Image: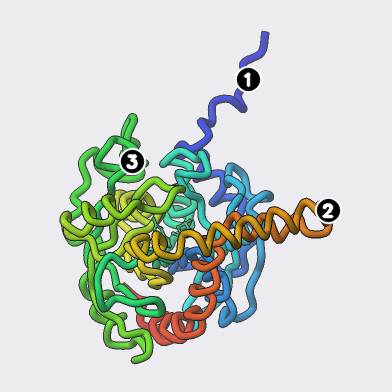
Amino acid sequence: WEARTDLWVLPHSYEACAEAAAWLRARLKQAPVVGLVCGSGLGALAQELQQPQSFDYGDIPHFPRSTVQGHAGRLLVGTLGGCPCAVMQGRFHLYEGYSPAQVALPVRTLALLGAHTVVLTNAAGSLREGLDPGDLLVIRDHIDLPGLAGRSPLVGANDSRFGPRFPVMAGAYDPALRRLALALAPPPLRARAGVYCGVGGPSYETPAECALLRMLGGDAVGMSTVAEAAAARHCGLRVLGLSLITNAAASHEEEEEEGPEHAKDMEHAKEHAKEHAKEHAKDTEHAKDKAHQEVLDAAQAGARLLAQLLLALAPRLQHV
Ligand SMILES: O=P(O)(O)O[C@@H]1C[C@H](O)[C@@H](CO)O1
Ligand SMILES: Nc1nc2[nH]cnc2c(=O)[nH]1
């Protein structure tokens, strides 16, 4: 009988992150000091990266796979405005079925590679009047609803090589980085600071849920970021959080009015698909995922301005 040493590495343990980091270190020309996580439809943020090396998540030990449209599933490492950066074109979400620790694995891997700062971007729904699609919310604080219910990457035996059992989350989003982002954001982004509510998804919120999140003090709502931020703070990374507003989360009231029209669209898409089952299978998918497609379109429209901000920020992030 031989011990299965391969089973000793728990899938999302310190050892798993260390193996992923070692695999990358062996291939990288330069270790990143800043990690950038691209939200839905924001993969183009990597466009300004100079001399990028590219790694498919599928090749990196222990990395999960991206399953969501708008998340390419690739890690690019190069320099942004002279600053060594790793850009995750795609992240992992709880609603994909990944555990909080899997969601946090890339951020922890970046920390083990030597990064000291992460920029977490996302596409988010607005909960506030006047916070409109195309606007930027620079995250001042978050409400981690899955985390509050015990779905946090920090649940389980604490590995003190990452950080303490009870990390403090006050000031989790670095105030100096936030001020810098607010100062450097191109005016059309109408950047302002606010509170991001992280939910599990994948369903979008009901009007009543939006009202609840608003009462709790949320300015925007999304399905990511909070687990990554918790893991990042646990292992001592500086965090900047940027939410590109892609839709009004509370616009479901309008949807009620638009309901029959929307239903007609869906009927049409279905009929169409019946007639041309194979060729038009994609159209049906599109119709089904209309809301997500709108999020992606809005994110892509804002990505250029966000990329400008990141290019201006990067040299200022290089040194702690
Ligand atoms: O990865 P992010 O938070 O940008 O993705 C948002 C939340 C869902 O994954 C998706 C909903 O359209 O966009
Ligand atoms: N939960 C949630 N996530 C989003 N991501 C982009 N828009 C939204 C939204 O309205 N709600």
State the residue at coordinates (31%, 73%).
137
Q: Quadrant of residue 73?
A: bottom right
Give the number of the mark in front: 1 or 3: 3
Amino acid type at circle 3 is Ser
Q: Is 235 left, or right, of 140 in this rendering?
A: right
- Name the colouring of the figure: rainbow
Query: Where is 5 relative to 88, above or below?
Result: above
Image quadrant where one finds the C terminus: bottom left
The mark that comes first in sequence, 1 or 2, is: 1
Q: Is 282 left, or right, of 91 in this rendering?
A: right
Query: Where is 47 relative to 236, above or below?
Result: below
State the residue at coordinates (22%, 46%).
167
Rounded to the nearest whole Å, what is the CA distance between mark 1 and mark 2?
Answer: 46 Å
Q: Which residue is mark 2?
A: 278
Q: Which residue is mark 1?
A: 4
Q: Is residue 74 visible?
A: no
Q: Is 233 left, or right, of 264 in this rendering?
A: left
Q: Is residue 41 visible?
A: yes
Q: Which residue is mark 3?
A: 152
* Residue 57, position as x, y percentages in the image: 63, 53
State the residue at coordinates (28%, 46%).
145
State the residue at coordinates (22%, 60%).
218
